[in-house]
C-alpha cells in the first residue's frame, strides 16, 4: 500500500518541477525580447533626435569671464583681546598712621618720588628726639673713655661698654628715621593719579589702598587664540589691531606667545606691546586682532560664490572653444583654504583659463556662450 501511494506523489512532484522550469524559460525568452525591442527603440529615438536637431539654433547665453592669474593669497582669523597696562598700580603706605595731608589731586601727573601724602609721625618724632639726646651723652662718654684708653687709663670693659652704648643708640636713631620716611607716601613710578581712595584724617596702613597711579604710555594686549593656529602664528608676525570704541586701527607685531595651552579653553595666549603716548588706548579696552594664518605668493584664487558642488565634487564653469564655438564647460576642482569671499584652488584650473564670473547661474555644461 505504501509503495502504491509514493509512486503517484513522485510523479506529481516531477510534473510541478517541469512546469516551473518551463515558466522560467518563458520569462527569460520574454526578457530577451524586451531588451531587443528596447535597443531598437533607443536607435529610433537617437535617429529622430538627430533629424529634429538639424537646422535648430542653440540659444546663446551672454556671460562675462576673467582670466585666471597667480596672485598673493592671505588667510586671516579674527580674535578679541583686552588692553592692559603694567604701570596700573594701587599704592598703599608702608607704615600705619593717620593721614595728615594729601599733596596731590586726581588727574595730577607726578614723577617717581613725588610726595603724595604724609601720615602722623608725632610719636616717632618724640622717640627720635629722646634718642638724639641720649646719643649725645653716649657720644661724649665714648670719646672720653677712648681718650683714657689711649693713655692706658681705665679698663677695657668700660671703653667697650661706652662704644656699644653709642652704636646701639645710632642704630635706634636710623630705625626711627626710617620709620619717619615710611610715613611719607611717594609715587613709585611716573604717571597720573587716577584715583585717591582715602581722605585726609582717615587711618592708613600697608593693607589699605590709598590711591591708584597709572602710566599708560606703554600698554599691551593679551588675546587667547585657538590651539589649531599654534603652528601658524609666531612672535614677530605683523597684526592689524582695531579698537572699535575709538574707531582706531594700527599695525603692530606679536611680542611673545605663551609656552602652554590652557587645558580648559584649548587656547594659547599672545601679547602685543603698544606705544600709547597720546593715552588714547585705555586699560581694559577691547581690541580686534586680525591674525594672518596662511600666505601663498603664487596662488590661484576664485570668488567663493563661483564654486558649486554636485555629487562628483566641487566645480566651476570656464569658457572653452569647442569646434569653433565658445561653450561653458564644467571644470571639477580641488580647493584649499576658504574664507567668506575667496577660495584657494589647488587643482583643476590653470593660469590663462577663463572663469565665468557673470551669468554662471544661467549655463549648464556645454551651453553656447557669448563674452
Image: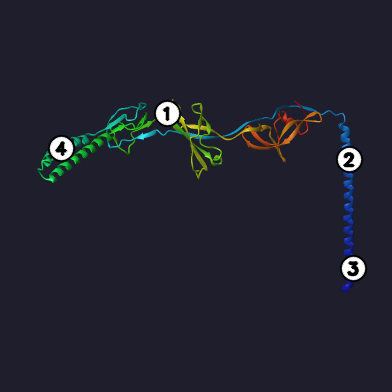
Instruction: Decide if residue 345 is on the left or right side of residue 48.
Output: left
Q: Who comes first in sequence, dot 2 or dot 4? A: 2
Q: In front of the other: label 2 or label 3?
A: 2
Q: In front of the other: label 1 or label 2?
A: 1
Residue that mark 1 sits on: 217
Residue 98, picture quadrant: top left
Residue that mark 2 sits on: 43
Along the viewing direction, whichever of 142 and 103 lies nearer the viewer: 142
Q: Who comes first in sequence, dot 3 or dot 1? A: 3
Point out residue 217 in the picture as x, y percentages from the top left corner: 42, 28
Point out residue 181 in the picture as x, y percentages from the top left corner: 27, 34
Q: Secondary structure at mark 4?
A: helix
Q: Who comes first in sequence, dot 1 or dot 2? A: 2
Q: In front of the other: label 3 or label 4?
A: 4
Is residue 252 visible in the rendered image? The answer is yes
Is disc 4 in contact with disc 1, using a CB cutoff of under 8 Å? Answer: no
Residue 139, picture quadrant: top left
Numbered label attached to residue 8: 3
Amino acid at each position: 500500500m505504501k509503495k502504491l501511494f509514493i509512486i503517484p506523489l513522485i510523479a506529481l512532484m516531477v510534473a510541478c518541477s517541469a512546469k516551473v522550469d518551463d515558466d522560467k524559460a518563458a520569462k527569460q525568452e520574454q526578457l530577451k525580447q524586451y531588451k531587443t525591442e528596447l535597443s531598437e527603440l533607443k536607435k529610433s529615438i537617437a535617429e529622430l533626435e538627430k533629424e529634429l536637431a538639424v537646422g535648430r539654433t542653440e540659444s546663446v547665453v551672454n556671460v562675462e569671464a576673467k582670466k585666471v592669474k597667480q596672485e598673493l593669497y592671505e588667510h586671516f582669523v579674527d580674535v578679541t583681546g583686552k588692553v592692559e597696562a603694567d604701570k596700573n598700580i594701587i599704592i598703599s603706605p608702608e607704615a600705619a598712621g593717620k593721614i595728615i595731608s594729601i599733596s596731590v589731586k586726581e588727574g595730577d601727573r607726578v614723577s617717581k618720588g613725588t610726595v603724595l601724602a604724609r601720615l602722623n609721625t608725632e610719636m616717632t618724632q618724640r622717640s627720635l628726639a629722646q634718642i638724639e639726646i641720649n646719643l649725645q651723652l653716649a657720644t661724649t662718654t665714648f670719646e672720653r673713655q677712648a681718650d683714657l684708653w689711649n693713655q692706658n687709663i681705665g679698663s677695657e670693659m668700660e671703653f667697650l661698654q661706652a662704644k656699644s652704648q653709642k652704636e646701639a643708640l645710632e642704630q635706634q636713631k636710623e630705625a626711627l628715621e626710617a620709620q619717619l620716611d615710611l610715613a611719607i607716601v611717594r609715587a613709585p613710578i611716573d604717571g597720573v593719579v587716577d584715583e585717591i581712595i582715602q581722605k585726609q584724617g582717615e587711618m592708613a596702613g600697608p593693607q589699605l589702598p590709598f590711591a591708584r597711579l597709572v602710566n599708560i604710555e606703554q600698554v599691551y594686549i593679551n588675546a587667547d587664540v585657538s590651539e589649531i593656529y599654534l603652528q601658524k602664528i609666531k612672535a614677530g608676525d605683523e597684526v592689524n589691531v582695531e579698537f572699535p570704541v575709538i574707531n582706531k586701527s594700527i599695525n603692530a607685531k606679536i611680542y611673545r606667545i605663551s609656552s602652554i595651552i590652557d587645558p580648559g579653553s584649548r587656547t594659547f595666549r599672545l601679547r602685543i606691546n603698544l606705544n600709547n603716548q597720546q593715552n588714547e588706548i585705555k586699560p581694559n579696552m577691547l581690541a580686534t586682532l586680525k591674525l594672518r594664518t596662511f600666505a601663498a605668493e603664487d596662488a590661484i584664487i576664485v570668488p567663493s560664490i563661483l564654486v558649486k558642488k554636485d555629487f562628483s565634487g566641487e566645480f566651476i564653469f570656464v569658457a572653452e572653444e569647442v569646434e569653433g564655438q565658445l561653450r561653458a564647460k564644467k571644470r571639477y576642482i580641488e580647493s584649499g583654504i576658504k574664507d567668506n569671499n575667496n577660495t584657494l584652488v589647488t587643482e583643476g584650473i590653470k593660469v590663462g583659463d577663463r572663469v565665468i564670473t557673470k551669468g554662471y547661474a544661467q549655463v549648464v555644461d556645454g551651453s553656447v556662450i557669448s563674452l
